Amino acid sequence: MTTLLAALALAIVPPSIPAPAKERAAQAPPVQAPSDLPPVPATPAAPISIVAVQPFTIAEPYRHRFRKDGAEFTSGHLIVLRAEAGFVQPRQVAEPVLCVGSQTAERLWSDPAKGLMVAIVPAWTERADGGTERPGDPSIDLVWFAAPELPERVDAAWIAAERARAEAALAGGRLSTPSTREIVRHPSLTTASQDALIARASALVPDPAAR
Amino acid sequence: MRLTHARAGGAFAAALLYTLPAFAQCPGDLDASGLVDGADLAVLLGAWGCTGACPGDLSQDSIVDGTDLGLMLAAWGECPPSTPAVEAPLAAVALSAWPWASWVDTYNSNGSVGIAIDPGQHPDLAGRAALLWVIEDRSPAEWAANANLSDARATGPQAVTCPSGTIQGNVVSLNVAGLVAGSGDAPARGYDLVLDVDQDGTLSPGDLIDGRDGGAGFWWTRDLAALGPYSTATIASHDVNDADILDSMELERVYYPTNAPGLRPIVAISHGNGHNYTWYDYLGNHLASWGFVVMSHQNDTIPGITSATVTTVEHTESFIDQHASMGGGVLAGKVDIDRIAWIGHSRGGESVTYGYDRLFDGTFTSPSYGLADIKCVIAIAPTDFLGTASANPHAVPYMLLYGAADGDVCGCPDSDIADSFNLYERATGLRHSTYVHGADHNDFNCCGTNDFSGPAGTAIGNTLAQGVAKASILAMIRRSMFDDRAMEEFLWRQNESLRAIGQASTVTVVREFKPAAGAASPIDDFQANTSTSVSTSGGAVNAAGITNLVEALANDNNTTFTWVTTDPWNGSVRNRTTDSSRAGVFDWTAAGSITWSVPASLADFTKARALSFRAAQGTRHPNTVAALGDLDLTVTLRDTNGLERSIRIGTLGGGIEEPYQRSGFGTGAVGWQAEFETVRILLGDLQSGGGAFDLSSIAMVQLRVGGADGSAQGRLLIDDLILEN
């Protein structure tokens, strides 16, 4: 090649694409690193314990977005749960839906390391044995993690089916009820809005450092 | 005047005159009027007796005398019709095998630019001395108005001698000293190249030019992974207090350039579930430094995608409505509300996609912006809860960024929800994917749970993953929002061939790119004419020596990645059963081929810039496992005269990527989802060496595998064999 180049150019290597690497023979599969993301546990499953319950009322209603047929509400319960990390861990794929009686709960805050979760349970009614109705109560009604799903897609029929599945598991000894030994029942709370309610909810977390 | 050098200094101009116009077609036309006439004679006579570098010294004997007068009189009258300067690619990278050079356009400013003057295509230039000019990029109109050459380098034009023989080993370096990369917001600055054969300092007949007919001869590019030209500031938290947004979801963080002129486009970021709007400082600061106003907002992801989409579309509206008053008015009059890019991560990735679908369907309308204002949607590892009809990008330019070690939206075969590439496959506009080995889901934010799921020792971590993200996202937004062609090669060239300066060379990145439907002509995209013997374009398809050729919906049909013959699409977690992206798949253990006959309507390949296809290795197939590595094969074109040109794709940068060696969802061999990678062959490269091969009349395209044509065995998913216009 007879190329005359400026002196500076002579020192520069022209850009090039390297030749492809050779293939290699099959070998033992590499060791896989464990993920810190806990797998989604099987459902139905119960929280380990209910840590705190607090009834509330809010002046400004807002819509319950954690079920497809959710209505506006002005009262309910704040609850704090302790649960296996796999239930508490936020994830992108579907999470087990937290249900209380025939209601879904709104996950507000969670700490997988401590296994704590704070949720809002909008008021609902339970049908008693005699056909009468009574207000639902997280401290006495079934609290469990139902199948993974987007809460905004579940409705009364879905909840009923999941509840039946949970009650069957309970009857069969495959589902326990959460411990209420450490439960703290706070006095009823009245706030103006959802924002204020959420701000007050953080006060329920037992370990302030975890808030 | 052609014989005076407009910009060069005196010494150079003097030297130049002695190298003149052996090639000039009208040597007596001293005033470049197209005539040799009295005006020229006056110039000659005016210089009569002049010695040295003189106008009128047509014989170049350093004196203006009777010899020159004789030459002028011999040429008296109209000049012969001139041949215009020829548009010819010059900037190139060297290849390790034929075609020995690829005439690409984009170059990183920490490297060099190759110059490949192919003696096969320009035999008349072999051995000839010439000047190589680098000129600030001009449009065709600017070239028509001004043919004078002005070198952008302080050293002036570069003396070269055109190579003889072949181009092999003859790609030389351009002297890039003094070239400036980037131009304002644009990471790349365009330059045109002129091979000034007659060395007259103008673009004139017989010269070669790279970059006259559109685009630049080459793009000299800053580091896309580094901060851009502008200083940035942040509004740490702004409460939009919008009645359409839940009280608890009203916060935004805004990143903006403080010294950028004019109106700045908007980028909105929608985080994922359990994430936070403050977790994308790396991206906000990066894009702001390149001139974008970036708004990251609280995203209502926990209930689901519909809720999250409300926050995406409403925060965009609130930002447009309120930006002028934010931060004490620092953004007033500085935001371009007609240029918006949406970026979403995980559930947020689906919410930006569904947001676009809602604008498309008209189920969401805003008085502040509309469908046409969304120039680009970028999803980082999106979920697919909503499926075919709703998680649908339609024709918006769409990018998918994905980490191969994602332990959350995992690309697992047992759930469509976790299969991000479903959304990508639905995109019908310009689309691009960046697939990053060793990156997990939360490597693309600051603070999420370490969900890495892959081979020990392959985790690349946040810093390296975000380096890839910054570069590829900037390139995609620039390409789709501003039609910035300099960025396009960062979206399709193999990572081994081109990556951002600051992107670690140790990181494996697999890229897909497909132009919008209107910019491509499918030879076979497998969407129509569903027989394996007929292509989309109606031509015959013939397979020889290969086995198990199937054409169908490219959808892994079971819940494991273990290879079984009943699941030919193993690893292709890219479709639901309601989706429609079809492809082909085959395997081989000996030499074989697939041949596509090209119908007459597509036979003129000179109308296209590139021939491309995408391909992926078959997950955990015995042939894949037996020879781990990038898979190589040969693409052959045959013209209607039976002449062929063949190129090994490995020559372009490594072949079809070796699958990431991730385990799970099965036993035995490892490997994960199908890693489709685009192979784009610049058709001009196939003219290397010249000859009679006729690109205007192509009869067939052939993939050759095995034997002497590439990897001895393999299994290949293949799709989108197209001509890119």
Image (spheres, coloured by chain):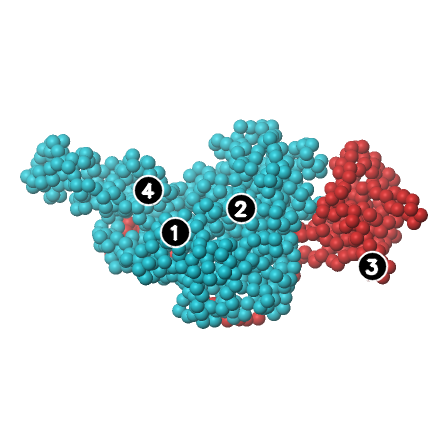
Q: Nearer the viewer, residue B530 or B710?
A: B530
Rendered cyan, the chain in question is B
Question: Do dots 3 and 1 share one subunit?
Answer: no
Q: Which residue is mark 4?
A: B212
Q: Chain of mark 4?
A: B
Q: Tag 2: residue type?
A: Tyr
List the single residue furthest toward the right.
A130
Q: Residue B346 location, x and y as percent?
A: 62, 49
Classify B405 as above or below B211. below
Classify B285 as above or below B465. above
Q: Residue A21 location, x and y as percent?
A: 45, 64
Q: Residue at x 79, y 53 (%)?
A: A162
Q: Residue B257 location, x and y as percent?
A: 52, 35
| In the displayed structure image, the side of residue B28 where residue A37 appears, left or right | right
Q: CA distance from mark 1 to mark 4?
A: 28 Å
Q: Which numbered dot is residue B398?
A: 2
**Disc 2 and disc 4 in contact, CB within 8 angstroms:** no
Rendered red, the chain in question is A
Q: Tag 1: residue type?
A: Ser
Q: Nearer the viewer, residue B300 or A202?
A: B300
Q: Which residue is mark 1?
A: B601
Q: Residue B409 location, x and y as percent?
A: 63, 54
Question: Do dots 3 and 2 share one subunit?
Answer: no
Classify B247 as above or below A90. above
Q: Which residue is mark 3?
A: A169
Q: Mark 1, residues whose alpha carbon is within 10 Å: few (<14), some, or many (≥20)?
A: few
